[in-house]
Amino acid sequence: MTPELRRLLRLGLRARHDPAAGAALRAEIARRPPEWAQFSAAAEQARIAPLLHRALREVVELPPEVQHRLRRAYLANAHRNLIILRALEAVLADLDRAGVPVIVLKGTALAATVYRNFAVRPLMDVDVLMRREHLDAALAVAARHGFHPERPETRAGSTAAYENELALIRREPMPIALEIHWSLFDSPFYQERLDLDFCWRNTQPLDLGGTTTRMLAPMAQLLHLCGHLVLHHGGEDLLWEEDIAELVRLEGASIDWNDLCDHARELDLVIPVRDLLLALAADGATGIPPAALERLRALRPSADEARVVGYLTAEQRSVAQRFWSDLASMGGWRARLGYAWTHLFPSAEYMRARYGIRYSLLLPLYYPYRWLRGILGWS
């Protein structure tokens, strides 16, 4: 996506609430009309076409084919999200009956409370947070609703021991992904710094149709969204940037910004929080008081955070580099040895599924093949 096209899309998103952004968008289009097919395709690829359909109808006159394409994305997203919401409500109700407390994360919570319209915010998957000790009970509930792990574990129990989530999928009547988290971030460094007690202390009720559950309160939500975007996705994504901008616009006046800055420093999330919020403010997002911007500018990451974030956001990071950085982030040799054994010598079931091994006699040969792929950075 070209910088010019990205700027137009950002202006389109801002124009929903900012007349100056709408005026700037109209001036840009009048000065240099975009290739409208590219504009529509980029909006769809960035997963913001449903949002732009609502944002641009009264702001700028679009060619009929663009209007049709954005409207089609809006209606398709509304249909898909309704199916996802109904499936999630059923799972959440059964989890509640099974005594499994849940926090609904990211897109689903934001669609209900920040956007207040399930048709405009695409849901790629559904993310929920729970305590690790409830994982077996949650898997039993999910299985009754047709959700099963996407792939075998590297070794039995390794996901709960070394990861922060387990991905489940229900394939019929429409594929729906459900991700069960027991930590907000997948890096061992952050799994040790952000415990679930912090999350549960910072929740609020969430009503989803006929089901009442929990979601992160605004301050914790903002920390999670900034961390997720930078640590998991490199810091650049129009939809997730808009999630943060919308949350700040709606909740900025109620957030204790000193508290947020203190928690960003304590949890080693200074770089994601500082850099994203300052960039959004410079781009015209509203809701951050001037005093908070000054406090954000003054934040400095710890040496540990700078090192880990550098690893996690490197553009060219091989499998071997990810392995060594995760290993170095773990506390204690027992955990490191277990992690190394699990990833260097996965179970036969995992190896067959991962590499499509048809003959058992070939299985031993695939272990050095796996190591070589990691060292050479092959996908």
Image (cartoon, helix red, strand yellow):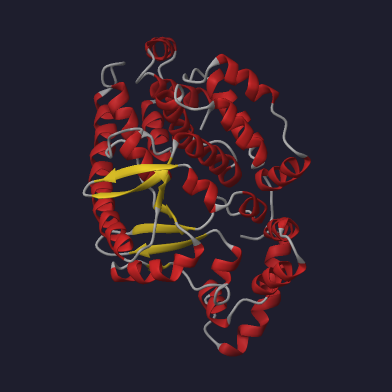
* Relative depth, front residue between 26 and 124: 124
Asked which quadrant contains residue 170, the reply is: bottom left
Asked which quadrant contains residue 376, the reply is: bottom right
* Percent coordinates x, y for residue 61 in the rendering: 28, 16
* Percent coordinates x, y for residue 129 in the rendering: 45, 54
Q: Is residue 78 above or below residue 56?
A: below
* Relative depth, front residue between 363 and 145: 145
Q: Is residue 315 above or below residue 286?
A: below
Residue under the image location 26 percent in, 17 percent down: 58
Asked if residue 279 lies left or right of residue 32, the reply is right
Asked if residue 379 lies left or right of residue 375, the reply is left
Residue under the image location 42 percent in, 52 percent down: 127
* Relative depth, front residue between 120 and 303: 303
* Percent coordinates x, y for residue 305 in the rendering: 72, 42
* Relative depth, front residue between 174 and 85: 85
The mark tally for this picture is 0
Q: Please, which residue is most extreme toward the bottom here? A: 361
Asked which quadrant contains residue 370, the reply is: bottom right
